[in-house]
Image (cartoon, helix red, strand yellow):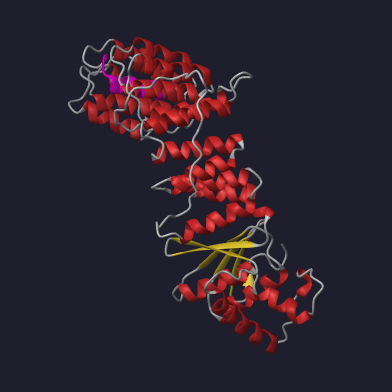
Amino acid sequence: MSAPAPASPPASLFHLSRPAAGPRARPRVSRSRCVASLASQPPTPPPANANHLVQTLCASGRLARAAALLQGLPAPTQRTYKSVLLAAARAGDAALAAAVHRRLKADPVFRSDPFLSTRLIDAYASLGELPAARQVFDEAPVKSIFVWNALLKALALADHGEEALARLADMGRLRVPVDSYSYAHGLKACIAASTSHVPASALVREIHAHAVRRGYGLHTHVATTLIDCYAKLGIVSYAESVFATMPERNVVSWTAMIGCYAKNERPGDAILLFQEMVASDEDLVPNSVTIDLLEEHALEKVPGCSWIEVKKRLHMFVSVDNKNPQIEELQALIGEFVTQMKNDGYVPDTGAVLYDIEEEEKEKILLGHSEKLAVAFGLINTGRGEVIRITKNLRLCEDCHSVTKFISKYAEREIIVRDVNRFHHFRDGICSCGDYW
């Protein structure tokens, strides 16, 4: 599918210069009770390896001690400053970040370091201290592309979309080169910058057009952000076009497109794309975000669906799935177990099949339930003694529950099934739920 050319508004908002490379990392944020402050700690004579010690203390979460050592350290290194700032952001300690800021301003070696300006802006942004982040940017003697991108990210994170776009326009006016991260932060800002006279869709399309002209339209990071933006705007066709033309896709790209379908009331397409993802030759392993999206938006809206991970690949099965190349083999194996169960007095519970058809046809449908297929696939493709782990989007039906109990005993395998309500641990013909779920 060819991507529709994103149209720019008549009067362009941005005039962006050509790029300079350089990735940026976003620190993770967590909370702790540490309220360390450099100003409140008395000077202590630093040991000979104080820089390394400060970094180690930060890594172990002992921020009060790290702050005390940093105060008396005659020559902190760039890595030491970075360690303390990252630790402050992780711990949610704005006081510590501010103390490092004060120390940096008094340091003749590093007060003009754009790398540390970037780290400081990132830390303040993570802590929700946007005014302080702006101050760092305004006072930075050297404003590299990384410093600009850090401010764009901080503004977009705080939903100050119009200000972020104004700063992006400033980059063009001042001939500051832009890169993929500049475009990605600008695209995220568009969603928060929507006004009555300039809708978000127009802003996104304009930056999309700029990215294409500058050679960034197919960049994985930019394209993934575009898919996410078009998904939020409900423009699924544009998201599809961007995804179809991407030369390289990672798990985040696939997840963005799956999420686009799931959030825009197209659960069937989300499931199909997920199946395509796990069956692709790119050796992709869906992450927790992918699964959460499917569980929240798609899986509860489609027929029974189960998946199993085998050799680091996720395999999905849909009830009565006639497209799977192994379907006949899997159903034949389940049929063998069912035949043995019937010899022991088992009667298939066809109450789960609501169609007005003959009992024999209902039994065939039961053989194609997704969890049975997943169990059979696990038996064929895993070694003896391995635990078979399956996840299902709906409640486990009574017939599948009975068959899985029998298989666990007959095949001498432990089987764990997580359905929408609980975990079922099958072993030696007994389930942990006590047949009550």
Quadrant of the frame with the C terminus: bottom right
Q: Which residue occupies 59% across, 23% down?
A: 194
Q: Which residue occupies 72% across, 70% down?
A: 398
84 up-or-down from 360: above or below? above
Nearer to the camera, 206 or 368:
206
Residue 93 in view, yes or no: no
Q: Position of residue 135 (x, y in %)?
A: 40, 11
Q: In the rendered image, which quarter is residue 302 located in?
A: bottom right
Residue that sits furthest to the left in the current view: 48
223 up-or-down from 435: above or below? above
Q: Position of residue 174 (x, y in %)?
A: 34, 14
Q: Is residue 118 magenta?
A: yes
Residue that sits furthest to the bottom in the current view: 343
Nearer to the camera, 206 or 38:
206
Characterize the magenta stretch by its predominant secondary structure. helix
Nearer to the camera, 424 or 347:
347
Is 165 positioned to the left or the right of 391 in the image?
A: left
Q: Is residue 107 magenta?
A: no
Nearer to the camera, 225 or 315:
225
The range drawn in magenta is: 111-122
Q: Position of residue 23 (x, y in %)?
A: 33, 33
Q: Position of residue 31 (x, y in %)?
A: 49, 30
274 up-or-down from 66: above or below? below
Q: Which residue occupies 52% across, 18% down?
A: 162
Residue 214 in view, yes or no: yes
**Total tally of numbered discs in the picture:** 0
